[in-house]
Amino acid sequence: MKDQGELRLPKQLSIGNPKQDVYDFIEVARAVRSLIKASQAQSNQLKGKDEELEKLKQQLNQVQQQNTKLNNQLKEQHQQFQELFSILFLNNPYNFTKLKDEIKKFKIQELVPQVRSKRTELERLITNAKNNVEANFTGIIDLLCQIKKQIDEYESDEKTTDPLIQSHLKGQLTAYQNILQTKLTQEELNTILDKQTELFQLEKHLENLQK
């Protein structure tokens, strides 16, 4: 097998034989062209590898910069936690668990009156809505709120992902809304439903903190 990188020249030019000389020079030219093409191909391959290497260097540099940034953020957060802990517990060694428990306690104290206020607000809206409809519609308002709460509970639970159940609940909600729209405005209904969701979220948050 001939080596593409090897330049084969004629052993001897035939002096006095023009045809042979032309043939030999053509062979030389072909060999030179082949050698040039092979050299260019190798050069292109090396260039491609250099470009890939440069890209890898850039990616590595970006990763290193991101790691440095994250490390700085972690150090800053740790320092902030320590400062917060020193405010709450003067002259005590830093303890993250103790800090977390104290923050939870403050958050619970903050949420309890919010839940109470939101529940009172929702009850007021429901009472006003019931006062504006006939007696046989008041039960539907209660059902509307119950179904909305079930939907909120279902959507907040990552383990329950049955689309049929979700579709059924939303279908019931729509049906109750359609019935009540003959007596209440859509804005009134939406306000009640929104407040129901807000109350559920606050209660859920409070429940999680108290675990």
Image (cartoon, helix red, strand yellow):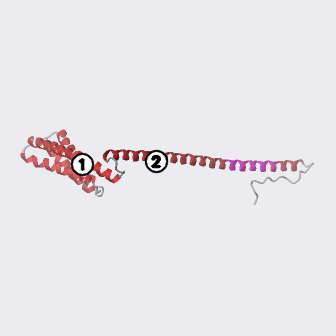
Q: Residue furthest left?
A: 135
The earlier-in-sequence mark between 2 and 1 is 2
Q: Of the numbered discs in the image, which one, if any, rests on residue 71?
A: 2
Question: Which portion, as a residue range, is magenta?
Answer: 28-44
Q: Residue furthest bottom?
A: 1
Q: Quadrant of residue 87?
A: top left
Who is closer to the viewer here, 144 or 149?
149
Residue lying at 13% horizontally and 47% vertically, measured from the top left: 141
Percent across and percent down for residue 76 are 42, 44
Quarter of the picture holding the C terminus = bottom left
Residue lying at 87% horizontally and 54% vertically, measured from the top left: 11
Identity of the amino acid at label 2? Asn
Mark 2 to mark 1: distance in Å? 32 Å
Q: Of the numbered discs in the image, which one, if any, rests on residue 78?
A: none
- Give the left or right position of residue 91, taking residue 187 as reference: right
Residue lying at 66% horizontally and 49% vertically, measured from the top left: 46
- Give the left or right position of residue 67, taking residue 52 as reference: left
Q: Of the numbered discs in the image, which one, if any, rests on residue 108?
A: 1
Say whether residue 36 is magenta.
yes
Percent across and percent down for residue 9 are 83, 52
Identity of the amino acid at label 1? Ile
Say whether residue 133 is magenta.
no
Percent across and percent down for residue 18 are 89, 47
